[in-house]
Amino acid sequence: MKKKLLVLMLGLAMILSFSLLTACGSNEEAAPEEEAADPVAECAALIDAIYVQEYTDETYAQCEAAKAAWDALTDEQKEQVEGEEASPDYFGRDTGDASKDDPLNQDDIGENELLVVSFGTSFNDSRTEDIGGIEKALQEANPDWSVRRAFTAQIIINHIYARDGEKIDNVDQALQRAVDNGVKNLVVQPTHLMHGAEYDELIGTLDGYKDKFETVKVAEPLLGTVGEDATVVNADKEAVAQAVVAQAVSESGFDSLDAAAADGTAFVFLGHGTSHQAAVTYDQMQEQMKQLGYGNVFVGTVEGKPEDTAFPAVKKALEEAGYTKVILRPLMVVAGDHANNDMAGDEEGTWYYGFVNGGEFEVEGADEAVDTGAGLGADNVNCQIEGLGRIEDVQKLYVDHTAEAMAQ
């Protein structure tokens, strides 16, 4: 009996030991649970991935993936999207109806092509009115030529395709389309404001295709040749100055520029600014305003380059001249991101906010913020968000530049 009891106890002990060993082994081999993927972070990462200037064979697929990730989010999750460049506005901001825009990427071009090259904008209404306005004027003036479009900003091309499904050619794609269609005579009309960095890049890309056409001609950008210093102006700058001032005065409700001055109102035309040597163009435009007798017109730039076009310098000059009211308007072909955000945005750091509230203003590249003094108040600051491209006289200037190039 004692022997049977001993055997039973030993058996139970072995079973218990085996169970403990098995349990321990199972714990060691069990993989830890993976953390659930964060769809908001994934969407932000996909947006950041297409916020690039380089085009690859994967670009369109990346754009589609970013849109699919956005569409899969709830409304609450969409408000949480944040990345290096990503934000709820990337897909969520209403900038107008993209279907009203013609990307001008059709084939069947024929032998003569007029390629209109712009920096581009993701603001649908501005693209239709400003860039589209120029393209339509050029087509009307040149019925025997096929007008096509190219943008130099791949970041913008990606944004438009990801959000709206509209494909716009970059410069390489547009030139290759011309080659594939058997174009013999190519005229390129840049809508760029000046001979700046974007224009230089365009010429560099075009050099690789020149031997693929019988003739290639490049028309002048809007403001024509740059000139050596701030005192050099030309007929193009004069025409643009007169056109944008006339349009701004008309939109403001004043009978004349002098009437606005008598009311204490100044106009500030805001360009992009650049560290390129063509930056002197902005000072030339200010000189042109002076020569035309436009004493209550000032030229500024978003980037504050040249320095005298930075917000603190412009605000000081305006107030020293005795003006207490301001109308802001872009000196840009397109009323896009800079016009809507950097100029007319109501958050700290914009030109609208600076004129309304005064105080410290951070200039790009400066070591510290500049105290700009008291603000003018919201009742005394207004914005006109319209690009140069929709002004008829500006469109005519592009038509003239194209005609000059064709006649070379």
Image: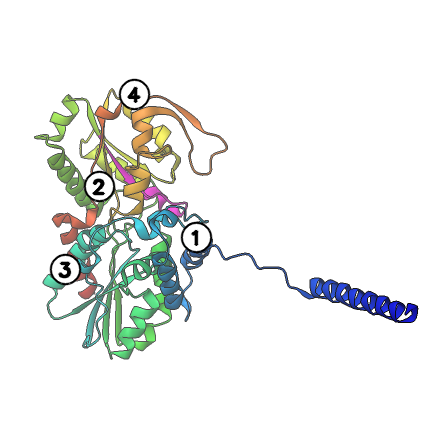
Marks 4,1: beta carbons within 8 A: no
Residue at label 4? 320
Residue at label 3? 136
The amino acid sitting under disc 1 is Val
How many angstroms separate mark 1 from mark 3 (CA)?
41 Å
Residue at label 2? 385
Badge 4 marks a residue whose secondary structure is helix
Badge 3 marks a residue whose secondary structure is helix
Q: Residue at x 24, y 69 (%)?
A: 105
Q: Residue at x 28, y 51 (%)?
A: 225
Marks 1,2: beta carbons within 8 A: no
The amino acid sitting under disc 2 is Ile
How many angstroms separate mark 4 from mark 2 (CA)?
26 Å
How many angstroms separate mark 4 from mark 1 (CA)?
50 Å
Q: Residue at x 26, y 40 (%)?
A: 285
Magenta region: 267-281
Magenta-colored stretch includes residue 112: no
